[in-house]
Amino acid sequence: MIRMLLLLALWSPWSWSIPVEGHQIMISAPSSYAVDVGREVIALGGNVVDVTVAVGLSLSVTSPYFASLGGGGFALVKMGEKVEALDFRETAPAATGPDYFVKNSKDSRTGGAAVGVPGVPAGLWELHKKYGKLPWRQLFTMPTRMAQKGFRVSGEWVGDTQNNLKRFNASGKKLFFKSGGNSYKPGEIIRQPGLAYALRELSRKNVKGFYQGPVAKDIVKAVNEAGGVMTLKDLADYKVRWLEPMTTKFADHKIYLMPPPSSGGVIIETALKLIDKVKLANYQPLSVDELHLMGEILSRSFRGRQLLGDPAYHENPFKKLLSADYLKSMADSISVKKTSQLEPLEKVTPHESENTTHFSVLDSKGNAVALTVTLNGNYGSGVVTPAYGIALNNEMDDFTTQPGKPNMFGLIQGEGNLVQGGKRPLSSMSPTLVEKDGKIVMSLGAPGGPRIISGVLQVLYRVLVSQKDMDQAIQMPRVHHQFLPHVLFIDKGRLSPEIIKALEQRGHTVKESNIARVNGVRINSEGYLEAAFDSRGEGAAGGL
């Protein structure tokens, strides 16, 4: 008898649970609703891509603060013979340019000027068109039902929604709050009939149901009434891009990484090579030496991020950043005894918001999707479309919005990432696949801005080198260093005061913070599928 598996667990420091196991298809996602939808698609005979599309649609209903149809993202996909990278990142409206925010004194984080052309519907459609098995419309059944009939909101939903009350336009306040401006409470039901209509349009007309017609008009109206310059042509012209993934060898595995406009692939590959060069595996896991060295490796790996940009508009210096000479110079600058600071290669890159989400799907044959989506900020721009209730991104803030001036985090932004109509902003989203003997054996990724990269890197290292299972690797404490500021961030509440003091004695400025929320699935040594979610936030793992 086939057993359907689902796990929801809580983390306490220095402990972990047994990962969920299956034998056909497994899912790790930030929502139990999403896993329920995925399990139903599996039961209907859907493949990995069908599950991915249905999970993505369900998150647009239950988690609009980070996974709306009004966002964008990246995916790594293995269906058949090769791994492919799909870029469905948001693009700048055609009427924007390098001085758009300077000349117009517009806000790049809240309001219509902050909104990029969404890519999520096109990304999901492109995946299904190329690799889906079940009918497109069938994948909308449960997500549309949840939007129409409602679902019970979680504590995370309530907290994130309350925190954005002042940022929402009138449509957002009307949709996400009860009459009188009162907040929903955990467990109460919210209904989104407008979004249900938009999902039906998308199911019946494919991407034309979103990028043309009434839904597109609703988006343009909302953006322009809030001070933006998006046009119907911007939406109609949107295209996804299929790219060649980056690859590198590590611990007898082949690692597939996302290329630019993700910065994650370059930084993770750099870090993996530095891990080998400093022989990190010789140090005890979670010792002061290991944590210190991991921070130094991350700092050096992030140093080159400001040189990256959208490859359609910018030449990325891969040869320099991954050259033997440069890597040797970075490794030679690392000491186990103390931290050291290097000069920037160029202007410093912006900090990104952490309101992104990731889910992983893997089957027993090695077919896999690692997909990361984002609105950038929590509820994106705060602009919600009036008729159909679609929360819109604020991805324009991921560009260099004001050259030479600090962003909201006090960082000077790099020039390779200037605003230009049709261009995609740089991102840290890092969907990742791992191959062994020609078969994909792991799918993982995370939300968390630049901390995505640190989270994915350390989970990879814990599984492939420290020999931890998926859940152990995800729950273990992590560190993060993004070169500037000169701060070593450590997992909040997961490292002892003695460890913190020892890191400070090596010269680190240490701050506690949450470091990404990794979701992953792997095939373990016994041949079972093993899924786990990150207890740093809400989530679920399950499948068949």
Image (cartoon, grey):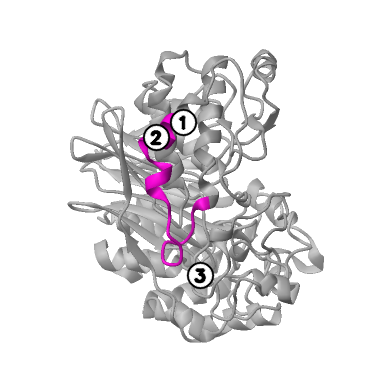
Q: Is mark 2 on a helix, strand or loop?
A: helix
Nearest the viewer among 329 and 169 is 329
State the CA–CA distance, disc 1 to disc 2: 6 Å
Reading the image, the residue beneath label 2 is 325
Q: Gap in Å between the C-alphas at discs 3 and 2? A: 35 Å
Left or right: residue 520 versus residue 504 is: left
Q: Name the residue under label 1.
A: 329
Q: Image height check: is 340 above or below 481?
A: above
* Mark positioned earlier in the residue sequence (3 or 1): 3
Q: Is residue 287 visible?
A: no
Asked if disc 1 and disc 2 are in contact, CB closer than 8 Å, the reply is yes
The residue shown at (54%, 41%) is 303
Q: Residue 339 lies in magenta, yes or no? A: no
> How dense is the environment of label 1, judged by Cα within 10 Å: few (below 14), some, or many (20 and up)?
few
Q: Please indicate whether residue 108 sits to the left or right of residue 37 in the image.
A: right
Q: Where is residue 161 in the image (x, y as percent from the top left)?
A: 69, 56
Mark 3 sits on what residue?
Answer: 91
Front residue of 396/139: it is 396
Rendered view: 240 above or below 328: below
The amino acid beneath tag 1 is Ser
Which of the two marks, 3 or 1, is nearer to us in this view? 1
Write the residue at 43% across / 62% down.
142
The answer to the question of whether label 3 and label 2 lie on touching residues, with beta carbons closer than 8 A, is: no
Task: Give the residue type at disc 3.
Answer: Thr
Quarter that holds the C terminus: top left
The image shows a total of numbered marks equal to 3
User: Which of the two labelled residues, at mark 3 and mark 2, occupies the earlier sequence position?
Assistant: 3
